[in-house]
Image (tube, rainbow, N blue to C red):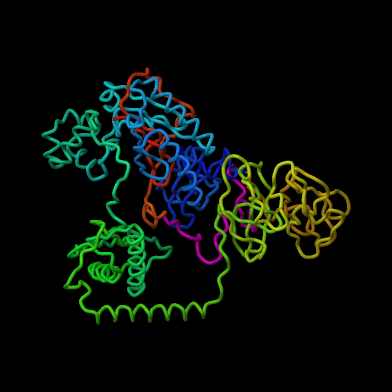
Amino acid sequence: MDAFFAAAEQAAKPSLRGKPVVVGGIGPRGVVSTASYEARVFGVRSAMPTAQARRRCPNAAYLTPRFTLYRQVSDVVMELLHELSPLVEPLSLDEAFVDLEAGGVAADTAAVRAVGERLRRDIRRRTGLTGSVGLAGAKMLAKIASEQAKPDGLVVIEPGTERELLGPMTVRTLPGVGPATAETLRRAGIHTVAETAEAGEAELVRLLGRAHGAGLYAMALGRDDRPVVAERDAKSISVEDTFEVDLTDRTRVRAEVMRLADRCVQRLRAAGRSGRTVVIKVRNYDFSTLTRSETLRGPTDDQGVVREAAARLLDLVDTTGGVRLLGVGVTGLADFTQEDLFAQVATEKAAEEEAERARRAADEAARLAADEPERPRRWLPGLDVIHDEHGAGWVQGSGVGRVTVRFEQPWSGPGRVRTFPVEDPALRPGEPLPLVGGPPDGWRDGLPGGLPGGLPGGAGGSGGRGEREAGEVDGPGGSGEAGGPGGSGEADEPGGSGGAGRPGGPGGGVLEEPGGPGGGVLREPGGPGGDVLKEPDGPGGDMLREPDGPGGDMLREPDGPGGDMLEEPDESGDGVAEASGGREAPPSPPGVQSSAPATRPNSVSAGAASEPGAGSGAGMSRR
């Protein structure tokens, strides 16, 4: 899939189509998961710190991920892939390899290309999104082909042209070559795939070891014998969290490690697995990262065992300077647990003491929570909401006790904007709506009074009242009440003080229609000038600005600097990867496809290389 998370958000939010969209952590330590192609033009890319992305593209819409929506779309795409072959190897939510030979596809390039084109059409028809397809004789080549096909294209790598294609590419293109391996090769004067092949197998084995060196040499020649595996065993299960403020209290650090250990065990048990090696990860204030591991006597899913191992490992790490990130994981997974007559939790007494400490900590946390005032509800940008009067929409921004919502659906045009108190009882969290096919049957059932929900061509309904300043003077329609039927339901009747576009009496704030149905603009009281809330002029606007100056910073969550951090979905581990990044080249124009003549390929890949959280696609491989 192409720029998957961002593309799904654009499909769900008509007002963001064609505008820069960035999905990821919105806090000061957040990281970009996916950037739309419009944002990539400005140099925004996956794994870049959100703060850096904001400097490069300040007018983009920065949204919190909605993994429920992404999984729904992913399920549809994977269903389409399973219609092609029983051998589908998912790599992420939006990328997979497919063995077409196992699906009975004819062994000629024309037939395989036709399958790829049909897959692209089906993805667009079923999801409203675009996907890229790569066809080649091996998994590695299929993935490279899908990269070249992005966005929204199809590329075939012909048998016999592999070395010519791979030669000028950097060694980082090859699977298994990370920063450390690339640096080792660079010191040896090896920078490209062609230079890797010319170095010879013996030299690569000397530099990297037998297994890695021999495998890398084969891939440099375009050989990749890895089969498509329908079900791959997870190598590890882990969770991690990045903190908005560095942790300096050792007691707090230990408590967080215990909490992460409990979450890790929960995921371990949910997967029906056990593990033999416990690992902790600590990222310090200076971005240095330390890992420590301990191998147990046998596989376990015992919470006490994992907790104590993590605590022992933490004792080996100096955290006095401050901790930015913590993680706990289990590796060496198995489908069984080994009974240990000599329990690794030293004695039953030790286990009881640990349980007692946990109970005391829970009691203390409950006491502190009871003493704290109730925190206001949090409305993160991009999340789905439902309002009793206005229907379904999404959060544009929030701050200083207010939340701004745009009421639109995937099948409607750009919707109207309204602002409410964060504690408005009529506003509540919603669920993602389908991206294609119009409103589902019964989708209005949960809306009070059968709200039209902003459907195109519907009656004006009650017409949003808008927000008024104290002392506002209403004439007919002055408060923004709907006058008559309208497309999306907001229309003011002219006339009277407080009418469309005219100031009211003293202190009379005026709600003025901006020139189309819906979307009143709140003016400052006392005159027609000085917008308090306005949509910015740049692309990807509609974010809430500071009221005390033009072009101000986005309003943050009132209870902390920058709001919540991004937490990765369970499939790939919780937490946020931190990175610093440079610019990337602007993407190729949409629709570019390979001009290579069609010949018989052995393998196919639909999609592109997966960026962290970014769009990629479905990969296919023909054996």
| Residue in the picture at 69% in, 59% down | 388
Work out whether residue 261 or residue 49 is closer to the camera in this orientation and state it: 261
| Residue in the picture at 29% in, 68% down | 319
Image coords of residue 509 (percent x, y): 78, 58
510, above or below 227, in the image: below
Furthest-top residue in view? 597
Span shown in magenta: 539-568
Q: Would residue 118 appear left or right of 289 to someone viewing this image?
A: right
Q: Is residue 123 magenta?
A: no
| Residue in the picture at 33% in, 64% down | 265
Q: Main secondary structure of the magenta part?
A: loop
Quadrant of image for the C terminus: top left
Q: Is residue 555 magenta?
A: yes
Work out whether residue 493 or residue 187 is closer to the camera in this orientation and state it: 493
Quadrant of image for the N terminus: top left
Image mark count: 0
Image coords of residue 540 (percent x, y): 58, 44
| Residue in the picture at 54% in, 42% down | 20
148, above or below 474, in the image: above
Give residue 215's quadrant in the image: top left
Q: Would residue 303 appear left or right of 444 to someone viewing this image?
A: left
Image coords of residue 63 (percent x, y): 52, 51
Image coords of residue 207 (percent x, y): 14, 40
Give residue 138's quadrant in the image: top left
Q: Would residue 443 appear left or right of 463 to someone viewing this image?
A: left
